[in-house]
Image (cartoon, helix red, strand yellow):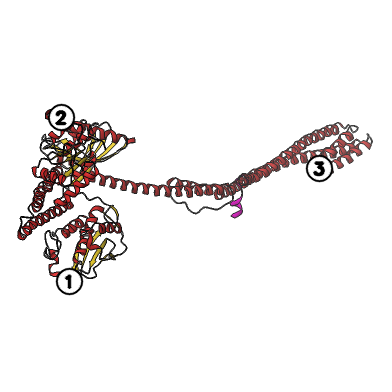
Amino acid sequence: MIAEVKRIMLAEDNANDIELTMTALRDNHVLNEVIVVRDGAEALDYLFKRNAHANRAGGNPAVLLLDLKMPKVDGIEVLRQVKADPQLRTIPVVVLTSSREEQDLVRTYDLGVNAYVVKPVDFIEFVDAVKLLGGFWAVVNEPPPGGARA
Amino acid sequence: MRIWDDAPLRLKGFVVIGIPMIPLVITGALILLGARNAGTANDYMGRANRTGTKIAEALRLAVDGDAAALPQTVSELRPLVFDSPAQLNHVRMISTLVDRLRHAPAVDAAGNRETILALRAELGAMQSVQDGLILDRSAQIRRLLLWLAVGGAVFGLLFGLLGMRAFVSGVTRRIYRLRVDAGQLARGEPLDPPYEAADELGDLTHSIHDASRLLRARDDEARQHARTLADLNRQLELARQELDQFFSLSLDLLGIADVDGRFKRVNAAWERALGWTAAELTSGPYLEFVHPDDREATAAQAEGLARGDVTGSFENRYRARDGSYRWLNWSAVAVVERCQVYVIGRDVTEQKRHSAELAAVNEELEAFSYSVSHDLRAPLRHVTGFASLLRRSAADRLGEKDARHLQTIVDAAGRMGQLIDDLLAFSRAGRTQIERKRVSLAAVVRDAQHDLARPDTAADIAWTVHPLPEVNGDPALLRQVFVNLLSNAAKYTSTRRCPAVEVGVQSSGTDETVVYVRDNGVGFDMAYVGKLFGVFQRLHSSEAFEGTGIGLANVRRIVHRHGGRVWAEGAVDAGATFYFSLPRAIEA
C-alpha cells in the first residue's frame, strides 16, 4: 500500500446521519481522514477544486460516500458529474441512502455507481454495511500519522 | 317420298327440268320426222309434177298421133307412179294402148282413132287421179302437224306440272322451312324438329340446327353471365353502399388523402370534431390545420407513409374552427401505387387530458412515496441509531427498566421501518407497469423459497411442490406473491411440530390456472376470511405472530392486476389454503 493515506469524503446534509456515520466509521477503526460536505454543490466544489475549495490540498478522495437527497445539487447530479469527468471517474462512489426506491437504484447504476447501500434502520446493520465498504475499498484500519478528523 | 327427298339437288334439277323435256323431245322428234316426211312430200310433189308433165306430154303425143315417141314417154311414167297401184294400172293400160297403136296399120284410121281416144281417156283418168293424190297428200301432212302440235303442248303442260309439283314438294317447301328456321334462328327461338334428308338441303337444315343449338347454348351462357354480372353488380353496389355508410356514419375521422398532403375526401365526423366543413378541409394542404409544433413530425409520418410504412398510433394537434387545438390519434396506411393514404383519426383530447391528469396524480404519488421512503425513514434511523448509541454509552448507568424502555424504542422504530417498507411495496405493486411474459411458476416458487421473510423457519418445513405450469405474468410481481404466501405459510406453521407446506395447481377450467398454497399451520376462523386480504388486517396478534398485515393485501393487489382472483379456506388449528388464479387468455 502506498504511504499516502487518502481521505474519505462524505456528502451528507443531515447532521444526525453524519454523526451516526462517523461513529460507525470510528467504531470500525476506519482511520482515514473524513471530509464532510453538506450539500451537492459543496461536494462538486471540493472535487473540482472550485470556489471555497479552490486551494485545497491533496488529490482525489479514496472513496465518496454520497447521500442522494441533498440541498442545492442532489446526489444523482454529483454522481453524474463525477462519472463524466476523466479525472474523477475512478473514485469509488458508494451511494448511501435511506431510499429503497427502484428508480434510484436504476438511475445510480446507469450512472456508474460502484455500490448502493440502503442505510439500514438498524444501526448494527448500518455498521456492517460501512464495515463492508471499509474492507472493500482499501481504507485504512490502522491509525495514520495525521489521525482521523471529523 | 324418301328416295326423292334424299336425291341430290342436281338429280332433282335434272328430273325437274328433264320431265317437261320428254314431250318436247318427242315433239321435236316427231317434227323432225315430219320434216323428213316433208322432204318426201317435196319429192312426191316433184314426182307428181313430173308425172303430170309426162302425162301431158303423152297426151300431146297421143293427140299428134306420134306413136313412135309414146313408148319412151310411157316407160318414163312407170317409175314415177310406182307407189300408186291405181296409176300403175293406168300405165299398164296406156302401154297396152300404145303398143296397139304402134302395131296397128296406118290405114286403119278409124281403129287408130279409137285407140287414141282410149289412150287419151286413160291419160285423162291418170291425170285426175294424179291431181287427187296430190290433194290427199297435203291434207294428210297438215293433219299430222296439227296433232303433233296439240299433243306436244298437252304433254309438255302435263309434264311441266308434274315437274313443278316435284320441285315444290322436294325443294320449295323445304326451302320455305329453311326460311322459317332461319327466321327462328335470327330471333333466337327454338327450331322445329328438322326435316331429315340426305341431300344438300338436309345438310343445310342440319347446319342451321347446329348453328341454332350453338347459338342457343351461347345465348344461355351469355344470359347466365349477364345474370352473374347483374348479381355481382348488385353485391358491389351493396358493398359500396355499406362502405359509404360506414364512411359517412363513422364516429371516427375517416379520410382519404393524396400523397402530396391534401385530403381528397373526409367524412362527417370531421365537422363534428373540428367544425370545419369537408370543403374547407379538402381545399388546402392538411398541414395548415396541424399545430405548428407538430408539423415536422406530421410531415415525417406522411413521408413514411408514402414509402409504404404503416402509421399505427400517431398523435398530433389539429386546429378547430374555434381556434382551439384538438389532439387526434391517427392510424394510416398508404396504397403507394394509387398514391392514396387512408387515415382513421380519433379525437383523444379528453383522453389526453385525463392521461395528463392521471400522470400528474401518479407523479405526485410517486414523489410522495419517494419522500416517504427517504424522509420518513431518516428520523427513524436516527431514533434507532442514537438509542443504540445511548444504550452502549450509558449501559452502566441504566437500570433494567431503562434498558427495556430503550429496547422498546429500538423495536418500535424497527417495526415502523418494516411498515413503511411494506406500504411502499404495496403502493409500488399498484403502480408499476406489469411486464407480461411466459413465466415458469416452478422457477418463481424456487426463487421465492430462497427469499422468505424468515429463512430460518423454512428449514424445518416439509415442502411439497407439485409440477407447476408456465403462466403469463410479471415474474418479479409473481415472485412477491409467492414470497408472501410462502412466508405466511412458514410463519403460521412455525409452532407445529411437523410443519408442512404444499404448493400445486388445481385442475380446473381451461381459461385460468388456479394455484394453491396449503399449510398445516394454525389456520383461521372462516368467519373472518373477508378480512384476510385487507391492508393492516390481522387475525393474530403481533405478539403471537409478527407481521404488518400488508402481505396478503399485496398478494391480492398483484393477482388482481394480472386479472385473477384470490381466496382462502381454513379452519382454526386445521391449516389454511390460499388460492389465486391467473387467466390463461392474457396475451403474453
Q: Which of B26 and B73 is in front in this view?
A: B26
Dot 3 amino acid type: Asp
| Badge 3 vs badge 1, beta-carbon distance below 8 Å | no
Q: What element carries label 2?
A: loop
Q: Position of residue B390 (x, y in %)?
A: 8, 51
Q: In which quarter of the image is the N terminus of chain A?
A: top left
- Would you say residue B156 sits in the magenta stretch? no
Number of the front mark, 2 or 3: 2
Query: Which residue corresponds to mark 1?
Result: B571
- In the foreground, A57 or B518: A57
Q: Please report the residue visible at 6 percent of the width from the left and 60 percent of the height from the top.
A: B400
Name the residue type under label 1: Ala
Labels 3 and 1 in the same subunit: yes
Question: Residue shown at 42%/46% (left/top)?
Answer: B187
Separation of marks 2 and 3 at Cα, in angstroms: 191 Å
Depth check: B61 or B563 in front?
B563
Dot 3 lies on which element?
A: loop
Marker disc for residue B365: none
Would you name the residue on which mark 3 appears?
B83
Q: How far apart are marks 3 and 1 (CA)?
A: 171 Å
As rendered, which of B281 and B328 lies closer to the eye? B328
Per the rendered image, the range of residues in magenta is B1-11
Subunit of label 2: A
Q: CA–CA distance between discs 2 and 1? A: 71 Å
The kind of secondary structure the magenta stretch mainly shows is: helix
Q: Quadrant of residue A80?
A: top left
Disc 2: which residue: A56
Quarter of the image where one finds residue A115: top left
